[in-house]
Image (cartoon, grey):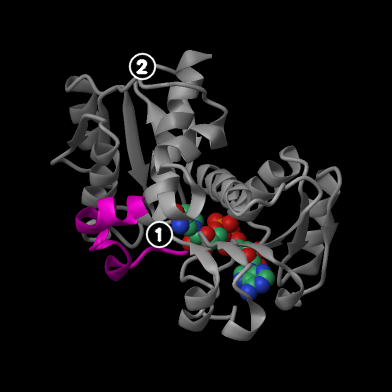
Amino acid sequence: MSRLLESDIYLIETQLQDYEDLFIRQTGYTMEEIAQKAVGLTENTKRIKTAVISVTSGLGIITGFSQAVGAILRHHRVETLIAEKTDVAGLQQAYLSKCGIAFLADDCVCAALGIGSAVHSDNGWATGRSFAAAIIEAMRKQGINPLQERVLIIGAGPVGEAAAHYIAEQHAIPVICDLDNHKAACLAATLGHSAWISSPATIHQFTYIIDAGTMGDFITGEDVTEKTIIAAPGMPCGATAAAREKAIVIHNPLELGIITMYFDCMKQLED
Ligand SMILES: NC(=O)c1ccc[n+]([C@@H]2O[C@H](COP(=O)([O-])OP(=O)(O)OC[C@H]3O[C@@H](n4cnc5c(N)ncnc54)[C@H](O)[C@@H]3O)[C@@H](O)[C@H]2O)c1
C-alpha cells in the first residue's frame, strides 16, 4: 500500500458528485451498485452509524484523510461521525456515540471494524474486488461479454490478488504480471483458469487492464486504443494523460474502495 498524499485527496469531497457521474458513464452503475456487486450484496439499503477515527502512529495523520473518508460515506447516505479524538480515545468516542462500524488507517492497513459485532473489511481486498467489478461492468457497457476475455492484472499485491479472484469468478481470464515474476506465478497458481507473464508486460497486447501496481505514468498513449478499458486503483495512476484521453480509465484514490468496505461490513452483518 502506498501512503496517500494530501494532494491525492483534498478535492474528493467537492468533486464527489462529478466523479459519481463520470463513473456511471464509464460503468453504467453507481459506485454503490458496483460496491454491492463486489461484495455479493443484493438490494441493501440499510445504513448504520459509522465512525472515522484518525490514527497518529507511524508517519501520522494525512491531512484531510478522515474528512475525505467521512465525505465518501455521507455521499452514500451513511450517518458518519468523524471523531475529534484520535487513536484509542477516538475508538471509545465512537463506541459511546453508538457507532456500529469504525474506519481506521495507519501506514500499513486501512480497515473497517464492527463495534459490538464481529465484522471486518480490509481496504486492499475491497479495492481490488470493486475495481474488478467496475471493469467487468464497463466491458458489458461496451457490449463485451467478459466470459473468457483476458484481463491483464498488473501487480500481485493484496489489491491485484483480490481483483484477480473477482475476475476469475466472472469466468474471465486473469493474466497476472508483477515486477516479481515469482509472485505473479504464485498468484496465478491459486486461480483456476489463469496465466502469468513476466514483467514488464506487453501492455498493447491487452484490451482490458487492471493497474494494481505502484508505478505512475507507465501505460502510454501508444499502449492503448479507443477500445481499451483500464481500471486503475494503483497510486499514482499508471495511465499517462495521453492514455487517459484515448482509453476508458476508471481511477479514483479512495472513493470506491471505502464504500465497498462499508457494504462488505453490511453483508457480513446480514449473513
Ligand atoms: N485507489 C484506491 O482506493 C486504493 C486502495 C488501496 C490501495 N491502492 C493502491 O493500489 C496499489 C496496490 O496496492 P497493494 O496494497 O496491493 O500494493 P503492494 O505494494 O502490496 O503490491 C503492489 C505489487 O505491484 C507490483 N508492481 C508495482 N508496480 C508494478 C509494475 N509497473 N508492473 C508490475 N508489477 C508492479 C509490486 O511488485 C507489488 O508486488 C498501490 O498503489 C496502492 O497504493 C489504491
Is label 2 in a helix, a strand or a loop?
loop
Residue located beneath label 2 in the image:
116
Classify mark 1: residues with Cα within 10 Å, few (<14), some (14-19) or many (20+): some
**What secondary structure prevails in the magenta region?**
helix
Looking at the rendered structure, the kind of residue marked 1 is Pro
Residue located beneath label 1 in the image:
253
The answer to whether residue 65 is seen in the rendering is: no
Nearest the viewer among 118 and 73 is 73
**Cβ of disc 1 within 8 Å of ligand 1?**
yes
Q: Position of residue 5 (x, y in %)?
A: 33, 68
Looking at the rendered structure, the kind of residue marked 2 is Gly
Q: CA distance from mark 1 to mark 2?
A: 30 Å
Residue span colored magenta: 1-21
Indicate yes or no whether the magenta region holds residue 19.
yes
The answer to whether residue 208 is seen in the rendering is: yes
Q: Residue furthest left?
A: 84
Viewed as shown, does residue 76 lie left or right of 97? right
The residue at 76%/47% (across/down) is: 172
**Cβ of disc 2 within 8 Å of ligand 1?**
no
Q: Which mark is residue 233?
A: none
Indicate yes or no whether the magenta region holds residue 5.
yes
Viewed as shown, does residue 237 lie left or right of 78? right
Q: Position of residue 116 (x, y in %)?
A: 36, 16
